[in-house]
Image: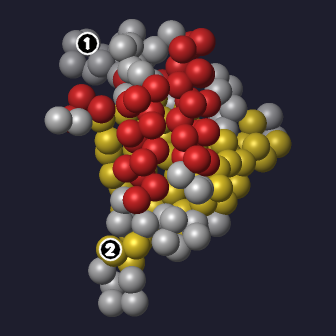
């Protein structure tokens, strides 16, 4: 499982000229389920993300979580995070979970974030999406469940 967290002042996702999700201050999360990922991986990511201290306090130190600042999350499925780019010039995506399982884990992840107390907006799984964001910092964190040791 992979996720890219971007601290944002605002973000939105549009599908077919319709905004499907929009937030003000919080996190834009690009999410990718891979083969052999589990509900436990998704729940772990949700717990870590909800408590990760990447928002600044009054002294400019990253001491607050998205929960602490009453921020929101915009979660966007992105199978291209599973890209294998080492051979040739066209990346392969065979490491991504099959679409049905990928969508199930994406929905599980979004619900796990909600269970942590977060407001969650979403993109549309499998759709072509236009994602707009205003990075804050910028602060970008890359998470990979294979790094969970």
Disc sitting over residue 12 in the figure: none
Badge 1: how crowded within 10 Å, few (<14), some, or many (20+)? few
Q: Secondary structure at mark 2?
A: strand
**Is 61 situated above or below 84?**
below
Relative depth, front residue between 53 and 129: 53
Give the percent coordinates (x, y) of residue 138: 39, 65
Viewer-closest of 147 and 24:
147
Measure the alpha-carbon separation of dots 2 and 1: 40 Å
**Circle 2 residue:** 62
Residue 20 picture location, percent across and down: 76, 43
Residue 2 sits in quarter: top left
Q: Quadrant of residue 96?
A: top left
Using residue 8 as the reference point, say whether residue 35 is left or right of it. Answer: left
First in sequence, mark 2 or 1: give its number. Answer: 2
Judging by the rendered image, the residue that carries numbered circle 1 is 88
On the question of residue 40 being in view, the answer is yes
Q: Nearer the viewer, mark 2 or mark 1?
A: 2
Residue 80 seen: no
Is 20 left or right of 25, judged from the image as shown? Answer: right
Residue, x 70% and y 55% (percent of image)? 22
Residue 108, quarter of picture:
top right
- Residue at point 28% right, 21% down? 85
Image height check: is 72 above or below 143? below
- Residue at image position (38%, 30%) is 41
**Relative to the observer, which residue lies in front, 109 or 126?**
109
Q: Could you tell me which secondary element the residue under label 1 belongs to?
A: loop
């Amino acid at each position: 499982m992979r996720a890219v967290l971007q601290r944002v002042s605002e973000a939105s996702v549009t599908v077919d000229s319709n905004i499907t999700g929009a937030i003000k201050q919080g996190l834009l999360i690009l999410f990718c389920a891979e083969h052999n990922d589990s509900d436990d991986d998704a729940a772990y990511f949700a717990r870590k993300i909800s408590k990760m201290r990447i928002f600044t306090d009054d002294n400019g130190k990253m001491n607050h979580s998205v929960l602490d600042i009453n921020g929101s999350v915009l979660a966007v499925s992105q199978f291209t995070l599973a890209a294998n780019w080492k051979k040739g010039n066209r990346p392969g995506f065979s490491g991504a979970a099959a679409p049905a399982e990928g969508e199930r884990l994406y929905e599980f992840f979004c619900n796990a974030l909600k269970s942590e107390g977060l407001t969650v907006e979403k993109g549309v799984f499998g759709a072509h999406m236009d994602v707009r964001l205003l990075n804050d910092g910028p602060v970008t964190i890359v998470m990979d469940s294979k790094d969970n040791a």
